[in-house]
Image (cartoon, grey):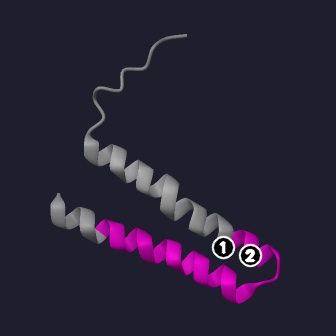
Amino acid sequence: MTIVDTSDISVQMFVAVMCFVLIIAPLVSLGALRLFQGKKKAGLSLIGGGILSYFLFQLVSGLFH
């Protein structure tokens, strides 16, 4: 095993990955779970919220980049 050098990762990349892992991915996965449970309105709203938060994140990151 080797040691991975993480000094090349910028703060912006770290924040982007954490935003994806902590906000966007759970919303989409919970939405898919609700769809499988037969709760279409809740599932589609969670997936829509994940997509909306992704576009909002892209907008904010584009303003500060």
Residue depicted at x 30% and y 35%: 9
Instruction: Work out which residue is located at the far right of the displayed protein and give it.
Output: 37
Instruction: Work out which residue is located at the far bottom of the displayed protein and give it.
Output: 41
Q: Position of residue 51 (x, y in %)?
A: 48, 74
Discs 2, 1 touching: Cβ within 8 Å:
yes
Image quadrant for the N terminus?
Answer: top right
Instruction: Work out which residue is located at the far left of the displayed protein and give it.
Output: 64
Q: Position of residue 45 (x, y in %)?
A: 59, 84
Residue depicted at x 35% and y 26%: 6
Question: Where residue 58 is drawn, which disc sits there?
Answer: none
- Callout 1: SS: helix
Range drawn in magenta = 32-58
Residue 3 occupies quadrant: top left
Image quadrant for the C terminus?
Answer: bottom left
Q: How many marks?
A: 2
Q: Amino acid at mark 1?
A: Gly
Q: Amino acid at mark 2?
A: Arg
Position above or below: 32 against 42: above
Disc 1: CA contacts within 10 A as few (<14), some (14-19) or many (>=20): many
Residue holding disc 1? 31
Residue depicted at x 67% and y 84%: 42
Q: Position of residue 25 (x, y in %)?
A: 55, 60
Disc 2: CA contacts within 10 A as few (<14), some (14-19) or many (>=20): some
Residue depicted at x 74% and y 69%: 33
- Callout 2: SS: helix
Relative to 5, is 35 on the left or the right? right
Q: From the image, give the main secondary structure of the stretch colored magenta.
A: helix
Instruction: Work out which residue is located at the far top of the displayed protein and give it.
Output: 1
Residue holding disc 2? 34
Relative to 7, is 18 on the left or the right? right
Residue 35 occupies quadrant: bottom right
Magenta-drawn stretch contains 24: no
